Amino acid sequence: MIILRLILFPSQWIHIDSLKAPEKAQLDLSGTAEICETSNFYISERYGNMVSWSTNNISNSIALDSSGYYYTLESNKCYTTNSDSFFLNIIQPSDFVELKDTILEEPGPAKLYLEGSEVIWFSDRDGTDTIAVGGSLITDTLHYDTSFYFSKNIDQTAPVYTIGLDIEKEANELRESNLFLDLSSIFTVESPMILNSVKVHATAEGWRIVQIKSFTDNQLFFSDSIYCNTGINTLEFRTALEPGEYIIQTDEFFNLANYQEASPRFLLLEGTPKFPYEAKNLLSFTRTIVGTGLYGYYFDWQFVPILEECRTAVSKYSVEVLTSRTSEYFENNFRLNPNPFTDHLSFSAYPGNYKVRLINQNGKELVETTADLLQSHDLSFLEKGIYFLMLYKDSKIHTFKIIKL
């Protein structure tokens, strides 16, 4: 008979860590934006928590100072959780330089066209002398090569912010109000913006009158009747607000008439809020009408900052005039003295009573007289620079360049 002996050896304990993946951070920005390099915005964790950013910073808020993706990474021994990402493109106005040109086959007005929004036309390369606004420019009659200058508005896409607590996340902490008043919310606007919407949880279906007023002088900025279904609703405002302190409220008398209480029958948050809920330098939800002990009715505050205008660098539009109508006779026999000049011009040959015009480089007429009278005409009022003398002789226009010292 064969006997088998099983020998058991003790083994080491194996500890299995049951950690869950970290909760995904909620940022006040998502999606994309294109803004000018002069803009100054931040991205923050909505609940004010310290988080690890993709930029290697650890904080609750970081500056949007370069193009690229922004998101957070939260890790434990087993998992890494990324937040939703936000993509930013910072526009450099100096990159938007254009060189445009056109040709006139003979002297005459030039019709210049540009694509783009809010075009401003200038007579000078520094962009100080505005001569027109709009996508087209019709010049005066041009007899020589001339340059015009322009700048365009650069289209931007503003970031869309959402601040305050997430109504979906806080759903289990909401309760009905036992207050005998409308729990209005007070907020501060620090930079011009458009307040798009907030979310509420209604316990009764029906209309509410919702208002936004200045907290300091009661000036009304928004008032509308908004129908709410039972459950979560979005209250749409789409209202532009300048810096100042404001209040969101409902009409208590309307509430009493329809729901037999001053409250609008919105759920409020149970627990102690952590005011302020804010987007840095833009908007801050600071308290309710009863102070900082209750969060109130309004969640997911969505708004868009109003961006400053961003314009391209000044660019040049050149016009080339092909036909010269200066006769050989005038070139060989007509002389101006002196040229360059200071106060007066004199003719050394071929004076007469024919028409003479003096124009600047943009075709603007400065003097209209005759050849005889021009010799006694005081030109000291002209600024230093290049001008053109146009002589209307023998059914032709003879053009000469002159220089004022």
Image (cartoon, rainbow, N blue to C red):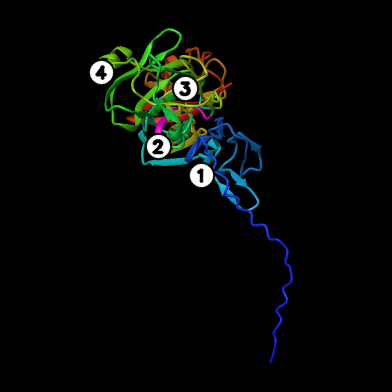
Magenta portion: prevailing SS class? strand
Count up the numbered dots: 4
Q: Earlier in the sequence, mark 3 or mark 2?
A: 2
Can you identify the residue that label 4 sits on? 258
x and y, in percent, of residue 123 in the image: 47, 27
Chain part drawn in magenta: 116-125
N-term mark: 4 or 1: 1
Drawn side of residue 10 relative to residue 82, left or right: right
Nearer to me, 368 or 20: 20
Residue identifier under label 2: 116
Q: Residues within 10 Å of mark 3 (few under 14, many from 20)?
A: some
Residue 378 position within the rendered picture, expressed as x and y whole percent measured from the top left: 50, 12
Residue under pointer 3: 192
The CA distance from mark 4 to mark 1 is: 41 Å
- Mark 1 = which residue? 84
Q: Disc 2 to disc 1, how far (Cα)?
A: 33 Å
Instruction: Give amino acid for label 1.
Output: Asp
